[in-house]
Image (cartoon, helix red, strand yellow):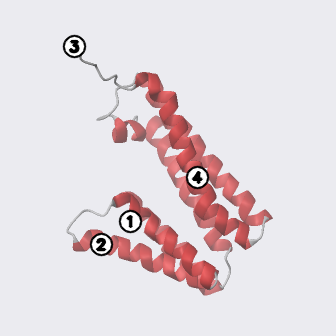
Amino acid sequence: MQSFLEFLPLVVFYIVWKFSDIYWATGALIAMSALQVLFYIVRGKKVPTKTWIFFGLISVFGGLTIFMHDDTFLKWKVTVINGVFAIALIVSQYVFKKNIIKQFLSESLELPENIWTNLNLSWAAFFAFCGALNLYVAFNFEQEVWVNFKVFGLTGLMIAFSVVSIFALYKYLPKEETEEK
């Protein structure tokens, strides 16, 4: 349910963009992000930090996009979000001596410390790459190409990188013991 809730604003953005324009789609994105926050509040649950960050950045960059009638702000939002994630992973690792990836996955995985560090840094590099790639696509191709890249390309890259990460960690995954009869 939470995964669906996270992608819902993006889906609504794309649908509205297909039938209208980038400005209406941006307004829908802001509204859906606000509804996402409201959903957690109404249910009496803590709004995840990631959801607050998305909502804040979408509101600021989306608001500027609509107010200035310039999609440049919205295009930068994707890079800023990826940059925030990359920086958070690196700063948490080296300044606060906390590995964010390890904190999320340590209940289900036991890995040597150097593997946790490599995984954390590889995700930081991935987010930095996605941010840079977004800028390249956003400012070297037509809006339609960028929207499709933002919705499908970045989502596909995230899924592909997740799968690659799982395969890289496969030898560290717990093995199920089979019963001999």
> What residue did someone put label 2 on?
39
Q: Residue at x 55, y 49 (%)?
A: 158
Asked whether the residues under the numbered discs 3 and 2 touch, taking CB atoms below 8 Å apart as contact, a structural biologist would say: no
Compare residues 180 and 113 and report the one nearer the observer.
180
Q: Which quadrant would the N terminus be assigned to in this image?
A: bottom left
Mark nearer the N terminus (1 vs 4): 1
For the residues marked 1 and 4, what is the alpha-carbon distance in whole angstroms?
A: 18 Å
> In the displayed structure, does residue 12 sit left or right of residue 128?
left
Q: Residue at x 28, y 19 (%)?
A: 177
Closest to the camera, between mark 1 and mark 3, is 3
* Element at label 3: loop
What is the x, y in percent for residue 166?
Answer: 48, 34
For the residues marked 2 and 4, what is the alpha-carbon distance in whole angstroms?
A: 27 Å
Please rate how many residues cluster around mark 4, counting C-alpha atoms within 10 Å: few if below 14, some from 14 to 19, many from 20. few
Q: Residue furthest front?
A: 181
Please rate how many residues cluster around mark 1, counting C-alpha atoms within 10 Å: few if below 14, some from 14 to 19, many from 20. some
Mark nearer the N terminus (1 vs 3): 1
Q: Amino acid at mark 1?
A: Leu
Compare residues 119 and 161 and report the one nearer the observer.
161
* Element at label 4: helix
Q: Residue at x 44, y 80 (%)?
A: 31
> In the displayed structure, does residue 164 sit left or right of residue 93?
right
* Element at label 1: helix
> What residue did someone put label 4 on?
156
Mark nearer the N terminus (2 vs 4): 2
> What residue did someone put label 1 on?
5
Asked whether the residues under the numbered discs 2 and 1 touch, taking CB atoms below 8 Å apart as contact, a structural biologist would say: yes
> In the displayed structure, does residue 76 sit left or right of residue 94?
right
Closest to the camera, between mark 3 and mark 4, is 3
Q: Residue at x 74, y 58 (%)?
A: 136
Mark nearer the N terminus (3 vs 2): 2
